[in-house]
Image (cartoon, rainbow, N blue to C red):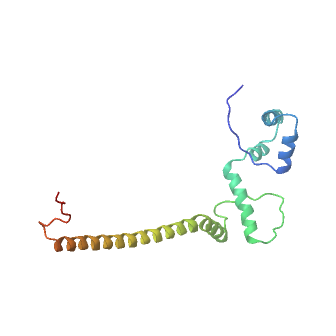
Amino acid sequence: MGQTKGIAIRIDNELLKEIENHNLGRNDLVIQAIESYLHESDSKTKSSSKKKEKTSSTWSEIEENSEKIKNISKKTPQPETTQPQKTTIESLTDDFYNEVYSIIYNTEVTPLKKQLELKDDLIHTLKQQNKSIQADKQFLFDHIKNLEERIPKKQRLFQKRKK
């Protein structure tokens, strides 16, 4: 048997129920599915363009997703074309960039700014507490000195009892 590796996948609830109720175990089902997929991909002969679509790179997936987001951001129905259009960096609109920036800003930057503000408030509060503690310390130090000056140096505070 091969090495043990963890694989995390996201599936629908219906598919999860089918997997749970299947008479084979999860591992056996996954192994069987991967083997059948690899067998099918080896046996099929596709044209080079279909293989490129099947094994598209991450960049092309990003381009497709950005096209979907672009269409959503415009919120206007687009007529379907017979040929898929490739999205390039130059073809992305300013609206798309602004929308992505605002999403990133709202999800990443704004919470960090709030955390910084809270930490600044905490630092300010601690500095004020430190100043008040220093003032209390100085007051007590001065009060002790004042008490020491009132007491004569050679006089004992607690006299020994004579037997």
Residue at position x 86%, y 49% in the image: 14
- Whether residue 86 is visible to the viewer of this picture, yes or no, is no
User: Split into 4 quadrants, where in the image is the N terminus?
Assistant: top right
Q: Is residue 143 visible?
A: yes
Give me the residue at 51% from left, 69% from top: 118
In this picture, residue 100 sits left or right of residue 128: right
Question: Measured from the top left, where is residue 64 in percent x and y?
Answer: 73, 57
Left or right of residue 151: residue 124: right
Q: Quadrant of residue 34?
A: top right
Q: Position of residue 44 (x, y in %)?
A: 83, 36
**From what the image shows, is residue 5 above or below residue 144?**
above
Residue at 78% over, 34% down:
27
From the viewer's side, name the closer residue of 152 and 32.
152
Q: Position of residue 123 (x, y in %)?
A: 43, 68
Q: Residue at x 70, y 40 (%)?
A: 7
Q: Quadrant of residue 110?
A: bottom right
Residue 8 falls left or right of residue 43? left
User: The C terminus appears in which quarter of the rendering?
Assistant: bottom left
Residue 41 position by quadrant: top right
Task: Tell which of 133 and 75 is nearer to you.
Answer: 133
Q: Residue furthest top?
A: 1
Furthest residue in direction left, as rendered = 154
Instruction: Establish if 92 lies above or below 40.
Output: below
Q: Nearer the viewer, residue 41 or 162?
A: 162
Image mark count: 0
